[in-house]
Amino acid sequence: MAYKLNMGGWNSVFAVPTGVVDNYIKLASGDNLKVLLFFLRHGGTMFTSDDVAQGTGVASGAVEDSIKFWEQRGLISAEGVELVPKAQDDNIVFKKNEPAESPSVKKVDLTRDPQFRPVEIAASVRGSDAVKFLFTRCENLYGRPLKHAEQNALMLIVEEAGLPAEVTIMLVEYCFAIGKNTPAYIKAMANGWVENEIVTIERAETELRRLKKFNAAEYELKRLFEMNCAFSKAQREYLTKWIDEYNFSTEMIYEAYQRTLDGAGKLSFQYMDRILQNWHNNGFTVISQVKENENKRREKAKEEKASSFDIDELDKLALEKYGGNNGV
């Protein structure tokens, strides 16, 4: 009797390097992944950029950028007209979780006026594939060629401060996501990242998760507080403490807000901070813990009051019993 294993759709599979998922699944764009999967599926077949564009739905120009993206990361190398896969640990430009490869950055004033001349910028772009890819990605985000001020901002970040191009891309993409993509804002944010040593992909991912969590909480609290204007700098410092340091949910902060209105009669961040600081010091993380503690305190107060009442009654009875004899 003959047997065979029917793998269904798995009868025709192709391999994807583990490094693609381990190191670049978050950094690579959808176009980058589409182009890579297309080539992996059709290994050994010759394609033009237009062929790949037709097969993936990615613009022809973006196909070239995607090929450059994977080449810069050491997963492939361009040898003439052929793309040759490379060992995953060979010549990868930026690796994660390796302190020895943490880039060297220096604290510089990224908010000062631009200083790079066009010829200097052009030379840097030609001399570095990483910088070229950064400029290309930013042009795609803006949907146009970069202005001189925008080019200078990027040059200050990667050339003078030494923030890696890949980390800079993550920073710029976040700025676009929140609608704050001016050179001044990008430089100010990059300055903060350098000062806080957010200079690797891993640290950038952690910071972006924190920012997304904070932004969502800030938006929700602004709605709950019925505020028509943005939070002030001092108010944002309070929010940072409550959300990042105390790790309170918006529900906990809103509960403190309601109690502030009852106690102070108005929105007061200082009053609210005293409430939340007390909860934090007592280890309360959810509203049910706060209310359970308050119930215990009320029960204890009732018991103490009842005990006090009983003692008073005994004293009264004693006086009634022995008081008359004392008066004789």
Image: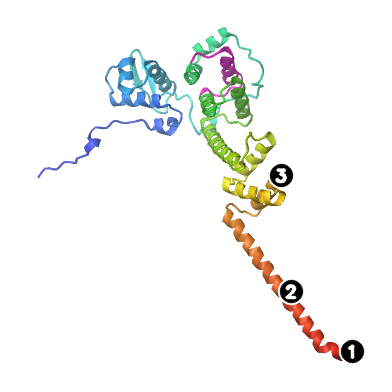
Could you say where residue 75 lies in the image, as x and y percent from the top left? 39, 24
Residues drawn in magenta: 144-165
In the rendered image of this protein, does residue 140 appear above or below residue 221?
above
Whole-number angstrom distance, CA of label 3 to CA of label 2:
37 Å
Q: Which mark is residue 308?
A: 2
Mark 1 burial class by Cα count in 10 Å: few <14, some 14-19, many 20+: few
SS under mark 3: helix
Label located before the other in sequence (2 or 1): 2
Examine the image and state in which quarter residue 295 appears: bottom right
Please tell me whether residue 149 belongs to the stretch shown in magenta. yes
In the rendered image of this protein, does residue 94 appear above or below residue 273?
above
Label located before the other in sequence (3 or 2): 3
The chosen color scheme is rainbow
Could you say where residue 204 lies in the image, as x and y percent from the top left? 54, 32
Type of amino acid under label 1: Gly
Q: Which mark is residue 270?
A: 3
Q: Is residue 320 visible from the viewing direction of this image?
A: yes
Query: What residue sits right under mark 1 in the picture?
Result: 327
